Image: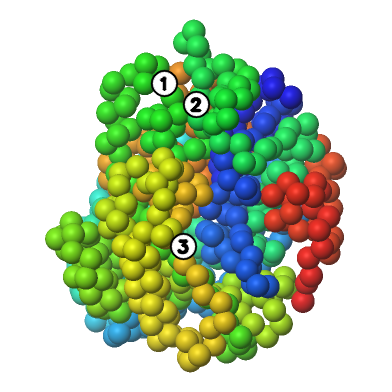
Amino acid sequence: MQDWDVIVVGSGMGGMTAAAYLAANGRRTLVLEQGDVLGGSTHVFRRKGYEFEVGVHYLGDCGRPEGNIPTMLRGVGADKHIEFREIDPDGFDVLTYPSVTFKVPRGWDNYRDRLLETFPDDAAALRRYLRIIRKLADAVDRATTPASLRGQAAFLLRAGWAAPFAMVPLSNLLDLCGVGPAPRPVLCGQTPAYAAPADRAPAIVQAGYLKNYVEGGAYFPIGGGQVLSATMAEVVRANGGDFRINARVAEIVVEGGRVRGVRLADGEFITAPVVVSNADLKRTYLELLDPAVVSPAKRKLVSGYTMAWPLFNTYLGLDIDLSETMTSAQIWKFSADADFGPMRKVANWQAAGRDRERWLRLIGDNAAAMIHIATNKDTVTALAPAGHSVVEIMTYLPPDHELWGLSAGGPVHGENYRTNPDYLAVKEAITEILIDLAGEVIPNLREHIVWKEAATPITQERYTHSTAGGSYGIEMNLRQVGPLRPGPKTDIPGLYLAGASLSWGPGVEGVMLSGVGAAGAVLRRDLFTAIRQGTVFGSADQIPAHGGDWDPLAVATDTTPRGQKARTTR
């Protein structure tokens, strides 16, 4: 079929959510994915009996029906097919510094009490900070605050006296409150979750994050991140849409001043009056569109956006069951008593004089990482052989091709990197640094490793075509937050946007919100209000049941429609 109502470019959760809502509202919708598996940064991969996550580590506020993710799933009938398990509520994040280990609990009062108990000398300052940040958090509605002038006005009204603090950088807010040096690493230690350091991220971003996780709790989807995109793919098909993998879009075709469809890399032309691009924002405007249809002002604006730093991921299969000795918490391990901001400055490639050996020494001395143990979060699914565990260790690195010995073109433009000696040397060195760091919190880690591999920002760029290998879109800084980010509607008739760079921001929740926002813009309907009021769109009864033989990766790779490939459970 070559003629569709809507084409969605990219199958990240922004694209899949947009497609699900459009299909459920009667639009014949086709999702095109350039890779060989749906899901973008939510997909999984398997090695020797181990299943690893690319990007799903925890999700906020999934235990209440009114949470944004449950609401969006329910709006297309997908909620009954996805289950979430809460991560340790006594410490869903464990921030580990040389001087202090702090477990971040669920609940504002619990969070306050633990901060005051840990840092009694800063009690008054911490109370001032928490009073402001909680007032902002109570006023934030992530679905509506960044999406429109009306939503922003409602936020300001709810925030009242605290509204002037919303756009103050988090580090400046701590200064204003008189917070001393001891609590600062802990208060800023979760900023890597949204990939913006405290001296660049406005307080409203921190408030929204804490509202989602401290107030709403942290959760992991049973079956792993792939269940999200696979279930949305089933929603698309249940409502008359479809998806294709290995279908790289080379051009969004604009003729006569409006969208006409897309042209694939092999020359195939597929028509549709509407295209939703869930591709990287910069690639959409600067590569997928003919320069003649993008104004010079828009090209300059998009070119000038600062991307969030990309991730380096180390994946380990262990021959030990860590669920017997460790909790389900995320572990943030810092080798120095400093937050993400100072470490980013140390890790800056230019500041190191573009000297790889010097840069690697700086990274080793100031390493910081998030450690995710999926087998502790999902003890139902066989994510590893019996008695084994999977561990992921992540850190942020500068978005710079030169660091990896690559030219500016990178893998998207055909550059071969996997045998590049500079690339391999940096990859191996960072892998070993992260294993050493994780070994400080996981006893005898090295002696239990039976599988090891790593994914660099260049790997991410290759698979998702994201600019500089980032997975968080443009950075959530003072110049690029909320209404200062793009919205779903563009000035090209028929072209809409979804993804991490939009006003709702990064993360699974943010991109899903962008997908609903994009679908609403196409349909010219306020979908958020409708689904919050209980509306369920489309043919929910046609979504296949997820029995014991249902495999989300089989669905997402389109090898066995309806996912009949068997998958075991514990």
- The N terminus lies in quadrant: top right
Q: How is the image coloured?
A: rainbow
Q: Most extreme residue toward the top, as rendered?
A: 256
Mark 1–mark 3 contact, CB under 8 Å?
no
Provide the residue designation for mark 3. Answer: 455
The CA span between labels 1 and 3 is 32 Å
- Dot 1: within a 10 Å radius of its alpha carbon, few (fewer than 14), some, or many (20 or more) residues? some
Mark 1–mark 2 contact, CB under 8 Å?
yes
Which disc, if any, is residue 303?
Answer: none
User: Which residue is found at the position 63% from the left and 49% from the top?
Assistant: 37
Looking at numbered disc 1 in the image, what kind of residue is underneath it? Asp
Tell me where residue 112 appears, x and y as whole percent. Answer: 40, 73
Evaluate whether residue 262 shows in this view: yes
- Marks 2 and 3, the one that precedes in the sequence: 2
Which disc, if any, is residue 290?
Answer: 1
The CA span between labels 2 and 3 is 28 Å
Q: Secondary structure at mark 2?
A: strand
Tell me where residue 40 appears, x and y as whole percent. Answer: 55, 49
- Dot 3: within a 10 Å radius of its alpha carbon, few (fewer than 14), some, or many (20 or more) residues? some
Depth check: give the residue in front, 154 or 378. 378
User: Which residue is found at the position 41% from the left and 60% from the top?
Assistant: 419
Is 491 on the left or on the right of 565, as rendered? left
Picture quadrant of residue 209: bottom left
Looking at numbered disc 2 in the image, what kind of residue is underneath it? Glu
Q: Is residue 127 above or below residue 288?
A: below
Q: Secondary structure at mark 3?
A: strand
Looking at numbered disc 3 in the image, what kind of residue is underneath it? Ala
Evaluate whether residue 520 shows in this view: no
- Marks 1 and 3, the one that precedes in the sequence: 1
Which disc, if any, is residue 251?
Answer: 2
